[in-house]
Image: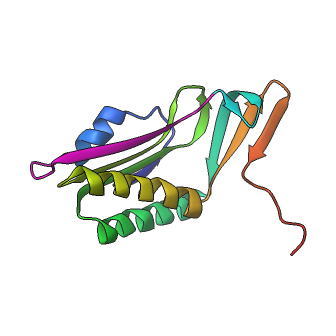
Amino acid sequence: MHRLVREPLDCARIMASVTAPGAGAVCVFVGTVRNHNEGRSVLRIEYEAYEEMALEQLAAVEAEIHQRFPVTGVAIVHRLGLLEVGEASVVVAVSTGHRDEGFAACRYGIDRIKELVPIWKKEFTDSGASWVGMQVRTSW
């Protein structure tokens, strides 16, 4: 299961969606909005996405997790819109037979999301707002 949503994430519900009788481990990564970045105070974050492509890439990440790890369930949910400090922005949940592959699958999932999925964030600080992670290379 993979989704983009605009409402607060229900981490317990997402975790329950991957729980299975044969799973000895359910591992969950929850990314949250922190109150600082690179020495600046962060007041809130806004997430935007190229939604059609983001959903395709989330499906690809989900498929990769299923191919690389012995998972019984995978759920990836990313929130879009304006989020306050402390709110969950992304959840990756997996169920596996054992904890080691669960931890590895969760880490792999969030790392691939950051690499592949066209979701961008704008940070709002006391000094204004700026897009994060969208630097443009000016020389090769």
Seen in the picture, residue 139 relative to 102 is either above or below; the reply is below
Farthest left residue?
A: 21
The front one of 38 and 118 is: 38
Viewport quadrant of the N terminus: bottom left
Q: Residue at x 80, y 41 (%)?
A: 130
Q: Is residue 140 left or right of residue 114?
A: right
From the top left corner, tell me how far across and down residue 83 is, in percent.
Answer: 59, 31
From the top left corner, tell me how far across and down residue 10 is, in percent.
Answer: 37, 33
Farthest right residue?
A: 139
From the top left corner, tell me how far across and down residue 105 is, in percent.
Answer: 35, 57
Figure coloring: rainbow
From the top left corner, tell me how far across and down residue 133 is, in percent.
Answer: 72, 52
Q: Is residue 107 magenta?
A: no
Count of numbered circles in the view: 0
Q: Is residue 23 magenta?
A: yes
Q: Residue at x 43, y 59 (%)?
A: 108
Farthest bottom residue?
A: 140
Q: Is residue 89 left or right of residue 42?
A: left
Q: Residue at x 47, y 53 (%)?
A: 110
Viewport quadrant of the C terminus: bottom right
What are the residue bounds of the magenta stretch? 19-34
Seen in the picture, residue 43 relative to 132 is either above or below; the reply is above
Residue 91 falls in image quadrant:
top left
Q: Residue at x 30, y 55 (%)?
A: 74
